Amino acid sequence: MSSEHLNRSQEGTEEPRRMSAEPDENVHNEIRVGGRLKHARLLKKLTLKQVASAAGCSESLLSKVENSKAYPSLPMLHRIAVALGTNMAALMAIQEKASVVSTPEERTNYVVHGHGIRLERVIPYAEGHLLQSNIHWIAPGASLEGEIAHEGEELGYMLEGEIELTVGGRRYRAGVGAAFHFRSELPHSYRNVSDRPARVIWVSTPPTF
């Protein structure tokens, strides 16, 4: 694989701002997805075995995920959603008041517990929306732990830190101020390659992830 640099962040004397992908006092309206997965499976009248087989995981793991005793990586959650005939955007949707402007305190969050990643929902999911946007908060060393591929198109802009982005088998480095764009059908993943937290605003269409 080749490695290309989109941008390198400038080194400075200022101490990095502490940031975590895990829940803290600034995380509001946290989305817990385990019960939603179970509800979707029961509505489809599917067994644990059927969904686990389609998603490429064990029945015991799926049961733990449904009962919030284990937390899937985003690629695993994506595979489970596909096996249930839905997508992550729909699974993580909650009833929200439509507003042109939103504050961090009002936005919902999905925390990937134990994986060092948090998604802050910038555009609430709703039928008819053409765009989806999240702020990805990525702890040092955290990664997607697998690749994701789905229909659509994606755009990202680095707000803080540095990540290694893999798209279609090629690796790129993206630092503060770097932007990236690719077709979502290409298998893609990322990881925080620095000892500082990373923050990325991510936009995709259609809302599937």
Image (cartoon, rainbow, N blue to C red):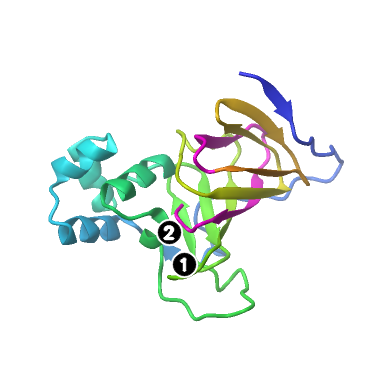
Give x and y (percent) for residue 120.
55, 60
Residue at horizontal 17%, vertical 62%? 43
Distance from Cα at disc 1 to Cα at disc 2: 6 Å
Q: Is residue 18 above or below residue 147?
A: below
Is label 1 in contact with label 2 (beta carbons under 8 Å)?
Answer: yes
Camera-side residue of 116 and 182: 182
> Which kind of residue does numbered mark 2 sit on?
Ala
Residue at x-position 56% and y-position 57%: 134
Residue 150, image quadrant? top left
209 vs 17, nearest the viewer: 209
| N-term-proximal mark, 1 vs 2 | 2
Q: Position of residue 13 (x, y in %)?
A: 87, 41
**Mark sitting on residue 125:** 1
Q: In the figure, is residue 163 to the left or right of 142? A: right
Q: Is residue 204 magenta?
A: yes
Give x and y (percent) for residue 72. 36, 43
Crowding around mark 2 (Cα neighbors within 10 Å: few <14, some 14 to 19, many 20+) is some
Q: Amino acid at mark 1?
A: Tyr
Q: Nearer the viewer, residue 26 or 102?
A: 102
Indicate whether residue 7 is drawn in magenta.
Answer: no
Q: Secondary structure at mark 1?
A: loop
Q: Which mark is residue 203?
A: none
Quarter of the image that includes the N terminus: top right
Range of the magenta residues?
184-209
Lateral position of residue 29 relative to residue 78, left or right:
right
**Residue corresponding to mark 2:** 89
Q: Residue at x 46, y 76 (%)?
A: 96
